[in-house]
Image: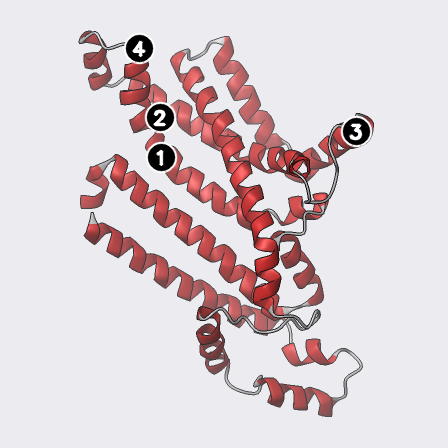
């Protein structure tokens, strides 16, 4: 287990380095930072002076290692548009995005695991068909359309929930459902497929033959093994939710880092974009690493492969 943990941690670190390097390079190719700072009215002399002042005239790899060294210490530079420290801007909003992502993945798991388990216990029954219908519906509905429909019904027509803001718990109800429902179909179908396979295995038949209670067979023996791939997929989806919350945060005006990234892209605010991409990549890599370690704990055979 320690060797497996060290190996997975080293791979995660390499992935972060590669992602940060690609992000920095592509962001500098997509826009001229000096022109963004100077504005369209800046003269050529002003642009050259800005390049020299900020070090944009240096080779890209030199700029990257300088930025990476500062980023590792928490210094992501200053926003070109807002003239604020990027670290402060991200820190102020990251809690909202983390809260939204956590609530969304919990909603997806609470809905998908029981549905998948029930569907596997009674395949081809009415319960199974209802679960599959929910899964198909979740895949067919675009997230932004589902969010807008909830705003119209629950926010405008019935006035049950607020349609924007982030100051009270009710502001997160509709965003949580809109973001979490998108992940529900994949998690539910994986749970169903895993439970069907496990329930038909020899050791489950042996456990039943020994007279173990149905609850013990289902939760202690079957679900524990069927849940292993679901854990890995849930970690991936959690990373997607944190990175893909841009649309939901914009629709509901939550103003987390998803909304901040959308605003920074519109304004070509490269320091903000680079910092947010690195934060999102870190979320994804760390969550994947934790899922791998949790799976290795649940199934010790994984750590010796």
Provide the residue designation for mark 1: 229
Residue 116 point in image, percent of width and height:
44, 22
The residue at 72%/47% (across/down) is 253
The residue at 41%/53% (across/down) is 285
Observer-side mark, 1 or 3, equals: 3
The residue at 63%/35% (across/down) is 178
Residue 89 point in image, percent of width and height:
62, 62
Provide the residue designation for mark 2: 194
Provide the residue designation for mark 4: 214
Badge 2 element: helix
Observer-side mark, 4 or 3, equals: 3
Q: Quadrant of residue 48?
A: bottom right
Residue 50 can be seen in this image: yes
**Cα distance, mark 4 to mark 3?**
44 Å
Q: Is residue 19 left or right of residue 179?
A: left
Q: Quadrant of residue 158?
A: top right
Q: Residues within 10 Å of mark 2 (few under 14, many from 20)?
A: many
Provide the residue designation for mark 3: 159
Q: Is residue 154 left or right of residue 287?
A: right
Badge 1 element: helix
**Cα distance, mark 1 to mark 2?**
8 Å
Badge 4 element: helix
Check if mark 1's residue and mark 3's residue have beta carbons within 8 Å: no
The residue at 60%/36% (across/down) is 176
Residue 305 can be seen in this image: no
Instruction: Please say if 79 is above or below 126.
Output: below
**Cα distance, mark 1 to mark 3?**
40 Å
Q: Residues within 10 Å of mark 3 (few under 14, many from 20)?
A: few
Observer-side mark, 2 or 4, equals: 4
**Cα distance, mark 4 to mark 1?**
23 Å
Q: Earlier in the sequence, mark 2 or mark 4?
A: 2
């Amino acid at each position: 287990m320690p060797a497996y943990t060290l190996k997975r941690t080293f791979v995660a670190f390499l992935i972060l380095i590669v992602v940060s390097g690609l992000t920095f390079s592509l962001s500098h190719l997509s826009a001229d930072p000096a022109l963004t700072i100077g504005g369209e009215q800046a003269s050529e002399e002003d642009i050259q002076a800005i390049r020299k002042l900020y070090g944009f005239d240096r080779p890209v790899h030199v700029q990257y290692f300088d930025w990476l060294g500062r980023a590792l210490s928490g210094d992501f530079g200053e926003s070109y548009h807002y003239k604020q420290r990027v670290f402060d801007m991200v820190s102020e909003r990251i809690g909202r995005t983390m809260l939204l992502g956590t609530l969304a993945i919990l909603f997806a798991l609470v809905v998908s695991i029981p549905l998948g388990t029930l569907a596997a216990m009674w395949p081809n029954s009415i319960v199974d068909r209802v679960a599959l219908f929910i899964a198909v519906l979740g895949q067919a509905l675009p997230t932004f359309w589902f969010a807008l429909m909830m705003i119209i019904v629950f926010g405008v027509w019935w006035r049950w929930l607020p349609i924007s803001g982030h100051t009270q718990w009710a502001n997160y109800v509709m965003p949580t459902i809109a973001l979490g429902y998108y992940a529900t179909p994949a998690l539910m179908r994986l749970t169903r497929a895993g439970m069907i396979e496990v329930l038909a295995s020899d050791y489950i038949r042996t456990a039943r033959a020994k007279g173990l209670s149905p609850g013990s067979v289902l939760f202690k023996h079957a679900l524990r093994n069927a849940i292993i791939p679901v854990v890995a997929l849930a970690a991936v989806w959690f990373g997607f939710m944190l990175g893909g919350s841009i649309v939901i945060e914009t629709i509901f005006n939550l103003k987390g880092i998803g909304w901040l990234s959308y605003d920074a892209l519109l304004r070509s605010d490269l320091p903000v974009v680079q910092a947010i991409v690195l934060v999102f990549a870190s979320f994804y890599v760390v969550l994947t690493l934790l899922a791998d370690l949790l799976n290795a704990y649940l199934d010790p055979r994984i750590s010796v492969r």
